[in-house]
Amino acid sequence: MSVTTNQQRMPSDSGSIQSALTPAWAAPVGAWRMLAQRRDAPKLPKGLDAAWDTGVGLFVPMVPRRARYLRRAERVLTMEDEYHGLAESALRDQAAELRSVFRLGREEVADVDRALALVREVSRRELGMEPYREQVAAAVAMVEGCLVELATGEGKTLVATMPAVIAGWRGRGCHVMTVNDYLAKRDANGLRKLYSACGLNVGWVEGQMPPPDRKRAYDADITYCTNKEAAADYLRDRLQLGRMRGLTDALVQKINHGGMSGLDRLVMRGLENAIIDEADSLLIDEAVTPLIISTEAPNAEQDRAFEQAAQLASRMNAEEHYKVNLRYRDADLTRAGKLFTAELCDGLPGVWQSPRMRDELIVQAITARELFLNGQQYVVQDGKVVIVDESTGRLMPDRSWRHGLHQAVEAKENLEVSPAKDTMARVSFQRFFRMYRQICGMTGTAWEARHELWQVYKLPSVRIPTHMPCIRIQHQERVFGSSEARWVAVVEEIKRVHKSGRPVLVGTRSVEASEKLSSMLNAVPLKHEVLNAVRHEEEATIVEQAGQPGRITVATNMAGRGTDIKLGPGIAEAGGLHVVSTDRNESGRIDRQLYGRAGRQGDPGSAIAFISLEDELVSKYVQRAGRRAARRAGDREVSGSGMNRLFNRAQQRAQRLARKQRKSVLKSDDWMEENLGFAGREH
C-alpha cells in the first residue's frame, strides 16, 4: 500500500488519552472518539447563500482586529512582574489549575490572558526567549481562530507554542503542521522543555515511522507533523474502520464478530485542532493536491502500451498533430493528429485498436513530453522519477502522479515503467483541513488570499505589525527581452554585491534554473552553495549560513520556509542580506516570501528581481503581448512601468485561474459526497 499524489492541482484529534479502566471488550479510547467525532467537511453554499457568503467574505477582513489583539497583548505583558516572582513549584501549580479550567471548557477571556502570560514566563525560564508584544498578539488571534500574517523572522515557531499549550490543556490534542519532517522533529524536541513545564507531552511524526510510534506521537498532548503525514494517517485509519460510520456500527461489529474489528490498529484520535505553520503554502498552494492511498495493480500489457505511446508520440509534430495549452497544462490531438495516430497504430494489437484508448495514451505521452520536464516538475534519481513540489522545490520520493501520467513520464525517460495503481482512499488537503473542528495558522504572506481563506476555511486573516520597523530596500524590477540576457545580468549583480562582502541569496523557480546559474557562477568563478530538490539534505545548515560574510546561496523556493537567516558579524553595517529573484512566480505571495528573507527583525537588507519576457509566466498568461514585446526587445533591458504592468497582468491571471481550479475541486468533492454516498465515502 502506498501514497500517491496528483501533480495537476485539483482536491484526527491528537492529545493525551485519559487514563481510565476499561472493560476488556472496549475499543481504544481513540477509536471511539474518532467514530464519535466523525465529521464531514462543510459544503460550499449555493444560490443566495453563496452570494451572502461572498459578501461576508469581503467584509470580514475589514473588521479591525489588529488593534484589539495588540491591546490584549499589552494586558498580558502587564502580568509580567507577577509571574517573574513565582517559584518553580507555584508556576507549575498555576499551570495545573489552568489546565483544569480549559479541560472543563469553562475558560473566560481572563483565563486565556493568564495562560498566555504563564507560557510567556515558562518560555523565558526554559528557552531563554520571552515573547514580545507582537508575538503575544499573534497568539491571541490564533486562539480566536484566525490566520495571522507575521513577517519572516518574527518568531512564528515560538508564537505557536502559546495556542498549542491552550489546545493541549483542553485534552483533545493539537496537531502543529510544519512543511517538512526535519522541522517537525526539530521543533518538537526543541520545545519539549517548555511543554513539559506546562504539564504537557509532545510527539512528532515523520515519514518512515512505524504505526506503534505514530500512535504514541498522536496520543501526545501536542503532535508536530506535516500535512502529508497527517492526511495519510487519516486515510489509513478510515480504511481500518471500513464501513463503520459511528459508535453504533462499531458496537454491532463487536457483538457480531468479536475482536477489535480494526479499531485497535488506528493511530489517530480524530481531527480536533490544527495549528498550521506556513499556512499559505498548505492551505492554498497545496490545497487541491489529492493525497491517495493505493495498491499496485500490475498489468504487463498496459506497461508495454505506455512505452509504445512514448515512441509513437515522438514521431508527431506540435501544431500539425497536436496543440498544447500551457495555461491549462493540457494537450489535444488535431484532426490530422488523430488520422496520423490511426495510421501509426494500424496493425498494433490490444488497446491500440480502440480509437478512444489509443488517443488517450498518445495525449498522455504528449503531455509527459511537453509539460512535465526533467529539472522542473521532476528529477530522475537511481533510475526512478521523483516528483518535485513546484511550490517549495522539495522532492517527494513517496509520491506519484495518477491516471497513468507517472508511467508516461517514466516511458519518456526510458526507465522501467512502474505498475499502475488502484485507488483505495483519497482526500484533497483542502477537504482534509476543513474537517478539523478548529484550525488557525500563521504565515508571512496571507493578505492576498484573505477572501479565499475565509470562503473556503472560514478563517479570518489579521496582519500583525513587525516588532521592529522593516528597513529593507526594494529595488525596481529589471526586465530583459531574452532569458539569456537576464542570466548574464544576474551573474553581474552577484559579482557586484559579492565584492562588498555582503551575502547574496538567489531564488530560482526550478532545479534546472538553479543548476544553470550554478554552472555560470562556476565559470566566473564564484564560490557558492546550491540548495534545491536534489540537494535537500543539508537544507537547514545551508540556509542558516546564508547570512555570513561573502556567502552566495542559490536556492529554489524552499529557502523561504522554516529556517532563519541570521546576519554574520559586520554584515548589518555593510547593508545586510541581498536577495535576488530570477523569475516571478505565479503567486505574488511566493515572491514576497523570498523578499522577506532580507530585512528580518529590523535588520538592513535589499531585494531585486531579474525577469525575462521569455519566462513561463508570460508565455502562459499573456502570450501575444509577451511575444510582441520580446520581439521588440531582443536581448536588451526593457525595464519600466509598462513591463511591470505586463507581468502584473500575467500574475493576476495565474492567481485567478488557480482560485477557480481550487473552487472547482471543492464543488467536485461536494458532488461526489452527495451522489456517490451509496458506495461509501472515498476518504
Image (cartoon, rainbow, N blue to C red):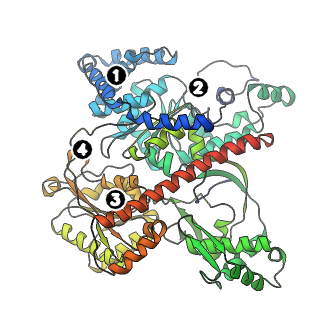
Q: Is the residue marked by circle 3 packed among few (<14), some (14-19), or many (20+) residues within 10 Å?
A: many
Picture coordinates of residue 48, whole percent (x, y): 60, 35
What's the amino acid at mark 3? Ile
The tag on residue 542 is 3
Pointer 2: what residue?
17
Q: Earlier in the sequence, mark 3 or mark 1?
A: 1
- Up/down of 414 relative to 35, above or below: below
What's the amino acid at mark 2? Ile
Pointer 1: what residue?
118
What's the amino acid at mark 4? Gln
Pointer 4: what residue?
601
Q: Earlier in the sequence, mark 2 or mark 1?
A: 2
What's the amino acid at mark 1? Leu
Q: Is residue 176 visible?
A: no
What's the residue at 43%, 14% (across, down)?
97
Image quarter of the C terminus: top right
Q: Secondary structure at mark 2?
A: loop
